[in-house]
Amino acid sequence: MTESTRLPSSLATWVERVLGPLACVRDASHARDNSQVWRVTGRTGDHYVKVAPKPILYTRETHAYRLAVPHLGHGNAPVLRDSSPELLALILTAVDGEPLKEEKSPAGRRVAHRQAGRLLRRFHDAVTGPLVQPETARVVENTVAGLDKHLAEAGDHLSAAEADMLRHLVSTLPGCGRLPAGWRHGDFLRNLLWNGRRCALIDFERSEGGPLVTDFVKLATSLWPERPELRIALFEGYGRPLSETEERALTGFAAADAASALAYGPRHGDPFVTARGRRTVERLLQEGRL
């Protein structure tokens, strides 16, 4: 085997039992300590081997591949070849494309975001009804309950007035009413690939049932303020705008996200997350909503 790295022995045994002998193994992990991903090449082509950091992430991802990902259509997402609960590992086909954020052409971005909206709608519609509706209330309750911890961790990065504003906005979430529920991706914006013609969606370890509007929070806080045309394109593909109820909830979830970002970003030395939190706070102070 020609390789630039090696799979752990137990993982290699399982992978070669599924795919056959490997010709090449390359580390494809993300730049974080708990990321374990390899791109492997063998007789059956290129695949990714992914080891989940936690059992809950493995469970979420395997459920997504079985319940929701097939609804995305051929070539629009990886295919799960096999999974191992003992190893917390998955073998996935490779899909063509680079991160969508690398697309420089304004026209190309609009086309890609329109396609991304169609993919997200298929994903959201894959699982609905009794399987996911109860999760919406749980997500709202957890968001409200977790706010004070994030505000305390944010410390001096929020003034008392800003913290009070975020508390008020998040406190409105339980009163928003019934929110459309389905299967959420959980990290949609960062996991879109684009090859110049086709958009693909990857990485489903944060996928679970709940309020669909939460998949739009990062878009609304980090992309749409400077690129409103991409919001238009995405919802053209999605096939419907957010309801008034979802628009109100989007503001509440964005306020919670800002507190989380200002707790996480400074602590982990992440200037991009910190800046996103600050921009959201400032916008909410000025406009009262997204």
Image (cartoon, rainbow, N blue to C red):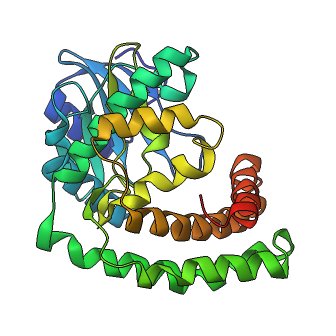
Residue positioned 29% across, 59% down in the render: 60
Residue 244 horizontal/vertical position (percent): 40, 64
Residue 157 left/right relative to 9: right
Residue 100 left/right relative to 2: right
The one of 93 and 1 positioned closer to us in this rendering: 93
Residue 239 horizontal/vertical position (percent): 27, 41
Q: Quadrant of the N terminus?
A: top left
The one of 31 and 214 positioned closer to us in this rendering: 214
Q: Is residue 97 visible to the viewer in this orientation of the structure?
A: yes
Number of disc labels: 0
The one of 246 and 132 positioned closer to us in this rendering: 246
Residue positioned 51% across, 56% down in the render: 217
Residue positioned 27% across, 65% down in the render: 180
Residue positioned 85% across, 76% down in the render: 159
Quarter where residue 93 is shown: top left
Quarter where residue 45 is shown: top left
Residue 72 horizontal/vertical position (percent): 20, 37
Q: Quadrant of the C terminus?
A: bottom right
In this rendering, the answer to whether 188 lies above or below 164 is above
